[in-house]
């Protein structure tokens, strides 16, 4: 009888662990989609407002797995290297979109450089640099907890 209680206590503990680890896995996967420029979107900035996208980037925190959504009309968004970003040069674009609503996944840590494919727009500040941090961290290790439980 006692042993039986012990077993059910263990299985209760185990399901608690499973719930906790499910919650922490959810935490890991709680990725965000950021709309670039918020309500403003991704147009060419108005005159003398060239820092609007660096201001927008500065008030957000980006992690691996998050994504950016660009909304625009009659324009484009290109993922480029650092050089292309500073020179507004599209010749070595990694990815380019001009469909009006484009989503880009931030799939690694480090800097991502985006520019408008229209040279003058880019010169006037339609370019975005985001610094991506590592994965959303969780103090628990869900995978090892799951293995432990399934062996009982
Ligand atoms: C833009 O800034 C320059 C230099 O500060 C200034 O001379 C010009 O009048 C400004 N233009 C507008 C439209 O605010
Ligand atoms: C720049 O553009 C943003 C977005 O429209 C706006 O909130 C901000 O007031 C503008 N700043 C200037 C100096 O025009
Ligand atoms: C679309 O963009 C191109 C290039 O910037 C420009 O020449 C054209 O006038 C724009 N058309 C509209 C309807 O805004
Ligand atoms: C972009 O860079 C290439 C060389 O990598 C150059 O041939 C081209 O003229 C540049 N385009 C512009 C618009 O500066």
Image: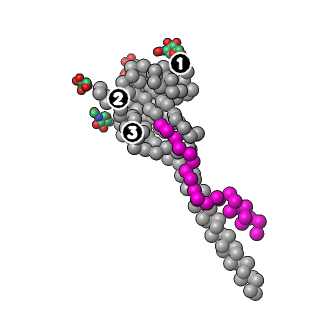
Residue 144 visible here:
yes
Q: Where on the picture, by quarter, is residue 150?
A: bottom right
Q: Which residue is mark 3?
A: 56
> In front: 58, or 44?
58
Q: Is residue 145 left or right of residue 124?
A: right
Q: CA distance from mark 3 to mark 1?
A: 26 Å
- What residue is at 39 percent from the left and 22 percent from the top? 123
- Characterize the local packing of mark 3: few (<14), some (14-19) or many (20 or more) Cα atoms within 10 angstroms: some
Residue numbers of the magenta segment: 130-152
Q: Secondary structure at mark 3?
A: helix
Dots 2 and 3: beta carbons under 8 Å? no
Q: CA distance from mark 2 to mark 1?
A: 22 Å
Q: Which residue is mark 1?
A: 91
Residue 33 visible here:
no
Q: Is mark 1 within 8 Å of ligand 4?
A: yes
Image quarter where the N terminus lies is: bottom right
Q: Which residue is mark 2?
A: 50
Identify whether 149 is placed above or below 127: below
Q: Secondary structure at mark 2?
A: loop
- What residue is at 51 percent from the left and 27 percent from the top? 82
Identify whether 75 is placed above or below 101: above
């Amino acid at each position: 009888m006692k042993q039986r209680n012990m077993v059910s206590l263990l299985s209760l503990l185990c399901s608690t662990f499973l719930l906790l680890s499910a919650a922490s896995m959810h935490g890991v996967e709680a990725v965000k989609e950021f709309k670039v420029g918020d309500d403003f979107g991704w147009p060419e900035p108005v005159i003398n407002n060239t820092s609007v996208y660096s201001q927008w980037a500065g008030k957000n925190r980006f992690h691996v797995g998050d994504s950016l959504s660009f909304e625009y009309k009659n324009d484009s968004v290109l993922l480029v290297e650092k050089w292309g970003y500073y020179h507004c040069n599209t010749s070595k674009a990694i990815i380019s979109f001009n469909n009006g609503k484009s989503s880009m996944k931030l799939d690694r840590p480090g800097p991502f450089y985006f520019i408008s494919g229209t040279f003058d727009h880019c010169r006037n500040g339609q370019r975005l640099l985001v610094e991506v941090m590592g994965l959303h961290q969780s103090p628990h290790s869900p995978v090892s907890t799951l293995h432990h439980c399934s062996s009982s």
